């Protein structure tokens, strides 16, 4: 990384928006800096937790959507 | 046909040709992600159900009228529709900045869980309920970036463009969102432990 490393770069790293070179440099820094690694670990854990929020709509709503789809045929116009 | 092996692109193509079962698979595959995105923005289960329906109806009309761009990907496309409808709702009703937290108890009955023992279900439910609540408690700008990046899979560059802020600002908001959530989760765990193991 030619620019100065910032905490925001950790976020780009967690969300896999770094270049391959940046990724390697961040990983190098993480190995050498315990405090930074701790922050990374904490933020990455929360990010993984977020995947668990998975809400389901009701069957009723899904059926309405599917029925609507079956009821219209705009191609024939 | 293995339901998970068929790509969204193939399903959309089949749907364009009139295969309703293909659409059913698309809905089944993405309903939770779209619903979660809407729900975390509007913080109201009933409204989220309505907006989900509106989102898919808009998608159906676009696809069936031959206006769908097959080059794009289905999920990001439908998530954009969902996000726009959720934001439009607030703009229309001028409720956006001052939305009051709803009870939301009905939402919690609809959470998906992968394990099936009663105890594990209960623990997961408690954790997920709280996490959802913590997300809802985040400042609006942080919550928006979090939803766009994590649930809509938008890049920080795209988020910056849509929000009219710099990429660094978007990154900073995401970072603070994660830090705030981390704090809330830690406090919550600590309180939970004290209840479980009182001195």
Image (cartoon, helix red, strand yellow):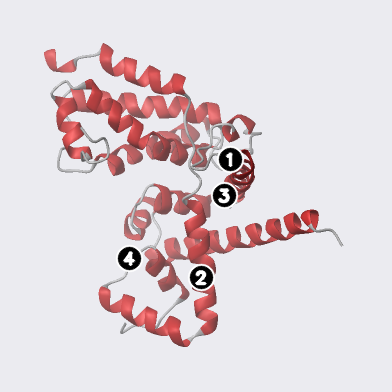
- In this rendering, which labeled residue sits more in front, label 2 or label 4? 2
| Residue tagged 3 | B135
| Residue tagged 2 | A41
Above or below residue B4? Residue A17 is: below
Q: Which mark is residue A17?
A: 4
The kind of secondary structure element at disc 1 is: loop
Above or below residue A45? Residue A10 is: below
Query: Label 3: chain?
Result: B
The answer as to whether the residues below labels 2 and 1 share one chain is no
Q: Which mark is residue B117?
A: 1
Above or below residue A74? Residue B98 is: below
Question: How far is the residue under mark 2 from the one under mark 3?
Answer: 19 Å
Question: How far is the residue under mark 1 from the one under mark 4?
Answer: 38 Å
Query: Label 4: chain?
Result: A
Question: How far is the residue under mark 2 from the one under mark 4?
Answer: 17 Å
Going 59% across and 49% down the picture, which residue do you hit?
B131
Quarter of the image containing the N terminus of chain A?
A: bottom left
Give neighbour class at mark 2: few <14, some 14-19, many 20+ (Cα, 10 Å): some
- In this rendering, which labeled residue sits more in front, label 1 or label 4? 1
Q: Is the Cβ of the residue at disc 2 closer than 8 Å to that at disc 4? A: no
- In this rendering, which labeled residue sits more in front, label 2 or label 1? 1
Task: Name the N-terminal-most of marks 3 and 1.
Answer: 1
Query: Label 1: chain?
Result: B
């Amino acid at each position: 990384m030619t620019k100065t490393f910032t905490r925001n770069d950790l976020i780009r790293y967690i969300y896999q928006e770094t270049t391959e070179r940046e990724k390697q440099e961040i990983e190098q820094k993480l190995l050498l800096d315990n405090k930074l690694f701790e922050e990374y670990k904490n933020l990455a854990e929360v990010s993984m937790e977020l995947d668990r929020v998975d809400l389901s709509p009701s069957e009723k709503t899904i059926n309405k959507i599917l029925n609507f789809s079956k009821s219209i045929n705009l191609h024939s116009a | 046909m293995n339901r998970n092996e068929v790509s969204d692109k193939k399903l959309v193509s089949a749907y364009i040709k009139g295969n309703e079962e293909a659409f059913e698979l698309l809905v089944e595959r993405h309903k939770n992600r779209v619903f979660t995105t809407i729900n975390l923005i509007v913080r109201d289960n009933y409204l989220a159900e309505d907006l989900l329906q509106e989102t898919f109806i808009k998608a159906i009309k676009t696809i069936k009228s031959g206006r769908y761009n097959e080059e794009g990907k289905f999920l990001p496309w439908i998530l954009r529709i969902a996000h726009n409808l959720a934001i439009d709702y607030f703009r229309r009703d001028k409720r956006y900045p001052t939305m009051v937290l709803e009870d939301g108890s009905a939402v919690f009955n609809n959470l998906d869980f992968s394990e099936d023992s009663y105890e594990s279900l209960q623990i997961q439910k408690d954790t997920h309920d709280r996490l959802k609540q913590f997300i809802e408690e985040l400042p609006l700008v942080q919550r928006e970036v979090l939803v766009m990046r994590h649930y809509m899979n938008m890049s920080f560059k795209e988020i910056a463009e849509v929000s009219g802020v710099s990429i660094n600002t978007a990154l900073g908001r995401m970072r603070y969102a994660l830090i705030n959530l981390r704090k809330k989760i830690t406090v919550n765990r600590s309180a939970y432990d004290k209840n479980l193991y009182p001195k």
